Image (cartoon, grey):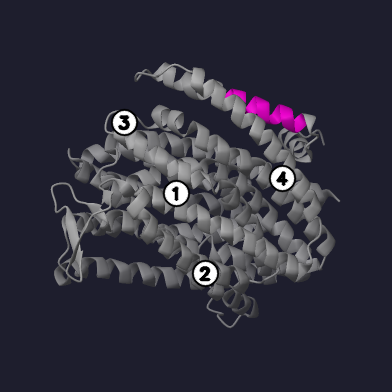
């Protein structure tokens, strides 16, 4: 069937668009690292941006997409287009009301808190930035609904291009808006907060013409008793609870990084129950977590999330048809694909972490110490790259069969584990402990979810996944040796940009060439799939 091949073609579209977004995102991070480094101002913006992102995950692309796509796909398969469009309208109306109310309440709270609670300078800065960034929630969650509709209709291009807009706005904000707000870093950072809000507005505007072309013009509908909406809400609620735990934990990483960091010029210790304890972290911990995570997100976004996004509607279609044979085959193919990319990406990031940070970040405000701290974070984050990639596919497999409770239960358990590990490891590994806790939790989560999915659906073909993973591991071992040798013979950069570029490029090319050559000799099916999906289609 054509459908058996088309998700890879869709993944190619999403991957290429995501690659463009990641390249622009890298450019934005290079600019911001140069201007803001690992300063308190950047720490504050990281938190002020993560809080709206938390709600985006809860009410937007996380919970809503996971609940909406299977139900909307079923309507497209079994009912009329009019019924499907009505479902879009009533869902959009309710989402707008909830999010609009949330934004109003949040803005009132942000205005009142300083008069009720005594805050130190770093938390005042976070709160002031939040007053600008929080309305981004409304726009980006409506974008997520539009993207879910278009993805269900197998339209991936414009939704995948939407994040590019945010990066462009962010980059323009560095050049055009930050100088308007003042000369100090803590004044300039407000220009980026404004740029984020503008980016959300433009992303929504991009989706509307495509929806109209597909025959969907948003009309408010108060039919909140709609049976499809009730099913979506029933599916969303457990996802929201699960994602709330997960996203709050992600946010807690940044809160811990700020709360347990010594403020410049401030006290060296804090006290709990009369016990004086030295701060385990330094200012900039939230910043280096951000920069490290951004480099980790590159392979995760370009390949892992792209494949999961593209395969989700196919999972939902097969589940609606009760076609478990093709469901199983598609799942196994997707898992093999993300492992084929994720395993060497993990090792490659560990090996090349210092050349990467030196080339992209180390200049001006981003010092050699910032580089060292960021490489430590990348080392621990990178251990779990393969697990991050695979988890997106496995979780969407559960969502497509409208089982939202299992990932929630497992995710909630991992949140508790992650928090305990966070508060334990920071005393030994500083901010690296926060990254290692994330990697350990993700690895355990994917093992548990895979076992539960196999038990639930009796998924077959794990032998093929095991065989593919062994081939990938062998190729990765050869890649590791050749890349390590090349790194050892490379000259020191001494701050020269061209040498930095060569120190990254030559080992990277050597690693990729070795990996793909060994994969070819081992007759890896995933290499053939990758080649097929990238070459120009002649049909």
Can you identify the residue that label 1 sits on?
202
Farthest right residue in view? 1
Compared with 405, 267 (above or below) is above
* First in sequence: mark 1 vs mark 4: 1
| Disc assigned to residue 413 | 2
Helix, strand or loop at label 1? It is helix
Can you identify the residue that label 4 sits on?
469
Can you identify the residue that label 3 sits on?
368
Quarter of the image with the C terminus in it:
top right
| Disc assigned to residue 537 | none
* First in sequence: mark 2 vs mark 4: 2
Helix, strand or loop at label 2? It is helix
Q: CA distance from mark 1 to mark 3?
A: 37 Å
* First in sequence: mark 1 vs mark 2: 1
Q: CA distance from mark 1 to mark 2?
A: 37 Å
> Is-magenta flag for residue 511?
yes
Residue 156 position, x and y percent, is 64, 49
Q: CA distance from mark 1 to mark 4?
A: 41 Å
Check contact, mark 3 vs mark 4: CB within 8 A. no
Q: Residue at x 17, y 52 (%)?
A: 268
Residue 314 position, x and y percent, is 73, 57
Relative to the observer, which residue lies in front, 168 or 293?
A: 293
- Magenta segment boundaries in residue numbering: 508-520
Disc 1 or disc 3, which is closer to the eye?
3
Helix, strand or loop at label 4? It is helix
Q: CA distance from mark 3 to mark 2?
A: 38 Å
Q: Residue at x 52, y 41 (%)?
A: 298
Does residue 375 show up? yes
């Amino acid at each position: 069937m054509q459908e058996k091949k088309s998700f890879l073609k869709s993944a190619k579209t999403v991957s290429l668009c995501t690659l463009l977004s990641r390249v622009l995102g890298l450019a934005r991070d290079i600019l911001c690292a140069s201007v803001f480094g690992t300063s308190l101002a950047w720490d504050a913006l990281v938190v002020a941006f993560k809080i709206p992102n938390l709600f985006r995950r809860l009410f937007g692309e996380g919970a809503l997409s996971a609940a909406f796509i299977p139900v909307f796909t079923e309507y497209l398969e079994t009912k009329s287009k009019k019924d499907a469009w009505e479902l879009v309208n009533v869902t959009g109306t309710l989402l707008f009301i909830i999010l609009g109310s949330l934004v109003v309440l949040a803005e009132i709270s942000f205005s009142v808190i300083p008069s009720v609670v005594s805050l130190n300078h770093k938390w005042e800065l976070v709160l002031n930035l939040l007053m600008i960034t929080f309305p981004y929630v409304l726009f980006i969650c409506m974008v997520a609904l539009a993207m879910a509709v278009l993805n269900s209709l197998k339209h991936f291009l414009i939704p995948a291009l939407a994040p590019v807009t945010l990066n462009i706005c962010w980059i323009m904000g560095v050049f055009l808006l930050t100088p308007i707000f003042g000369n100090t870093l803590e004044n300039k950072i407000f220009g980026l907060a404004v740029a984020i809000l503008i980016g959300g507005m433009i992303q929504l505007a991009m989706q509307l013409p495509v929806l109209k072309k597909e025959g969907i013009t948003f009309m408010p509908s108060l039919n909140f008793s709609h049976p499809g909406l009730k099913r979506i809400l029933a599916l969303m609620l457990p996802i929201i609870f699960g994602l709330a735990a997960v996203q709050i934990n992600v946010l807690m990483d940044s809160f811990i990084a700020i709360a347990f960091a010594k403020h410049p010029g401030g006290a060296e210790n804090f006290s709990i129950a009369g016990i004086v304890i030295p701060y385990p972290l330094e200012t900039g911990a939230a910043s280096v977590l951000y920069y490290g995570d951004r480099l980790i997100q590159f392979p995760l976004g370009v390949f892992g999330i792209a494949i999961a996004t593209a395969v989700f509607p196919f999972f939902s279609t097969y589940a609606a048809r009760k076609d478990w044979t093709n469901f199983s085959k598609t799942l196994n193919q997707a898992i093999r694909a993300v492992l084929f990319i994720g395993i060497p990406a993990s090792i490659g990031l560990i090996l090349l972490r210092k050349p990467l940070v030196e080339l992209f970040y180390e200049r001006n405000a981003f010092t050699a110490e910032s580089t060292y701290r960021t490489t430590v974070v990348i080392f621990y984050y990178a251990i779990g790259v393969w697990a991050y990639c695979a988890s997106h596919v496995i979780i969407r497999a559960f969502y497509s069969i409208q089982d939202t409770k299992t990932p929630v239960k497992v995710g909630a358990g991992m949140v508790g584990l992650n928090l305990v590990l966070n508060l334990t490891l920071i005393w030994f590994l500083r901010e690296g402990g926060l990254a290692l806790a994330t990697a350990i939790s993700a690895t355990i989560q994917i093992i548990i979810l895979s076992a539960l999915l196999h038990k639930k659906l009796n998924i077959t073909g794990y032998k093929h996944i095991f065989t593919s993973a062994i081939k990938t591991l062998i190729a990765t071992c050869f890649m590791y040796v050749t890349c390590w040798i090349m790194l050892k013979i490379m000259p020191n950069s001494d701050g020269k940009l061209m040498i930095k570029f060569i120190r990254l490029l030559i080992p990277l090319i050597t690693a990729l060439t070795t990996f793909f050559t060994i994969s070819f000799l081992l007759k890896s099916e995933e290499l053939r799939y990758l080649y097929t999906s990238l070459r120009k289609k002649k049909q």
